[in-house]
Image (cartoon, coloured by chain):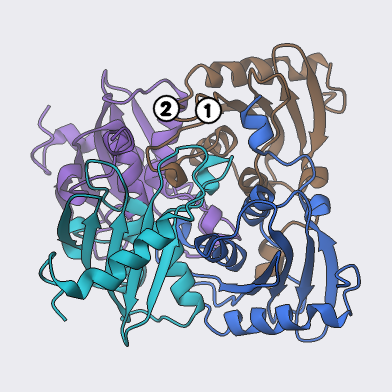
Chain colours: A purple, B brown, C blue, D cyan
Amino acid sequence: MYFNDPQSHAWDALVEAAWQGWEHAHAPYSKFHVGAALLRAGGGIVAGCNVENAAYPSSLCAERTAICAAVAQGMKPGELSALVVVTEAPTLTPPCGACRQVLAEFADDLPILLVNRHHRTLHSLADLLPHAFTVRNLNG
Amino acid sequence: MYFNDPQSHAWDALVEAAWQGWEHAHAPYSKFHVGAALLRAGGGIVAGCNVENAAYPSSLCAERTAICAAVAQGMKPGELSALVVVTEAPTLTPPCGACRQVLAEFADDLPILLVNRHHRTLHSLADLLPHAFTVRNLNG
Amino acid sequence: MYFNDPQSHAWDALVEAAWQGWEHAHAPYSKFHVGAALLRAGGGIVAGCNVENAAYPSSLCAERTAICAAVAQGMKPGELSALVVVTEAPTLTPPCGACRQVLAEFADDLPILLVNRHHRTLHSLADLLPHAFTVRNLNG
Amino acid sequence: MYFNDPQSHAWDALVEAAWQGWEHAHAPYSKFHVGAALLRAGGGIVAGCNVENAAYPSSLCAERTAICAAVAQGMKPGELSALVVVTEAPTLTPPCGACRQVLAEFADDLPILLVNRHHRTLHSLADLLPHAFTVRNLNG
């Protein structure tokens, strides 16, 4: 697979799954619909969408929805291989800090592709969350 | 279906799914493993488990994992029909307040079955979260 | 003090502090401004407001802002005596489920006064969060 | 003031306030005590500590406790000038991703000093949260 190239067809199935998640976004408060999809080691794909709440702090982002759904299906730390985030916003939408934190629980590094209707850019978790707080900090 | 009876076989598939979610809990910090499963209107079952994080506030409970996964699969408000929560704790484990809040986004009321290896008790969301804060509060 | 009477002057200083917190709400996304104030055993008052974030799940409610600020000033579990929540919404605004959860970390029960420009009603934490999940559940 | 030098005495009052916050940490679950203090434009200092909860996701970090307390006292976006985070962990403790997200609501950039009993290092918010998700993303 060629996840170091944002234009690679390796991303196609993940991008499609992320748009399918996007269609299910529950975002009546922000009207900002987000979809995500992740690739598990072994090849499984899990999609997510944002799930907002009238009490805004109880909302959840698309990326975390996908990660938690994947864990419930058996994904373990070290088995998260790639992530796609899609919105229709003209500026590509990066993961929020809290989502980066949850990604870092399951991967030391990760290619992250940001996609909208016209563009895509490739980032990595290591670039988006340098000096991450992890279990290594907790254990001293 | 007979979800008003905690011993009804109507609960069997949900309880089984919740224990399957439980097996996937990522709970290295609390060591407190939780599984959940919900029933969607129409009959689909979605499981969840708790997904902890080295930064504790970025953790997610099993109930919310199941709800968000179900939304990513297309569940809408009003389509959440029943919930099961399982742990091995000798005292049955109720949903935390934040999970009750997220349940209330998708159901006005809901039968909630708490299960461990020996017992089960039946609650309802209306009983567990009276005077809920909902979209009706936001809209004045 | 007479916190069992919603009209008691015992509430006056807390209500005033909650409105002062309300004036500082950072709520550019919901436009729903909330203030809160709590009474510590010993008499100290600590105010809070909601603090929203462009990434909605990273927002915080007024009640939790007040509680966490009080803890940073030295409040311990068992030292939380009363809470007021104020908004201008015509329907009185109850704490969300997540705030009830955080209140339950610091008090087994608590009088909670809901206030707007015209009305007030008195609740208790025990009524708003029955069968709470607490440290007793974690410890089995 | 000389916040570009980690050894500058400009940091002294903030470091002292962060240790005072640290003494009040409510961290019975992780046993990982964290203190924080921020400097407001104009000179005010606000301290915070982590405030954990039996339901781990309802916990709050020290940095967010300080920020939210400062907002309740009147701090506005653009008025957050510096942050200190203190722990006794031998490896210096960086803010988690969610705290970086909340910092980014109130400052485009920010000097962040990490301190333990023996060492200190200086970071910046721009370095710790590149490509931040902000209100500019929400507004397209």
Q: Is residue D56 above or below residue A2?
A: below
Which one is nearer the viewer's eye here, A67 or C79?
C79
Host chain of mark 2:
A
What residue type is disc 1 on?
Cys
The reply to whether residue C28 is visible in this rendering is no
Question: Where's residue D24, x and y in %?
Answer: 49, 56
Which one is nearer the viewer's eye here, D51 or B18?
D51
How many other residues sit within 10 Å of disc 1, few (<14), some (14-19) or many (≥20)? many
Mark 2 and mark 1 in contact (Cβ < 8 Å)? Answer: yes
As helix, strand or loop, the secondary structure at mark 2 comes to: helix
How many other residues sit within 10 Å of disc 2, few (<14), some (14-19) or many (≥20)? many
Question: Where's residue C19, x and y in %?
Answer: 65, 83
Measuring 24% from the left and 70% from the top, which residue is drawn there? D12
Badge number at residue A71: 2
**Location of mark 1 (residue):** B49
Q: Is residue C3 above or below residue A118?
A: below
As helix, strand or loop, the secondary structure at mark 1 comes to: strand
The reply to whether residue D74 is visible in this rendering is yes
Marks 1/2 same chain: no
Question: Where's residue B134, x and y in %?
Answer: 69, 60
Q: Is residue B17 left or right of residue B84?
A: left
What residue type is disc 2 on?
Val
Measuring 60% from the left and 35% from the top, which residue is drawn there? B63
Which quadrant of the view contains residue B44?
top right
- Quadrant occupied by the C terminus of chain D: bottom left
Measuring 32% from the left and 84% from the top, which residue is drawn there? D43
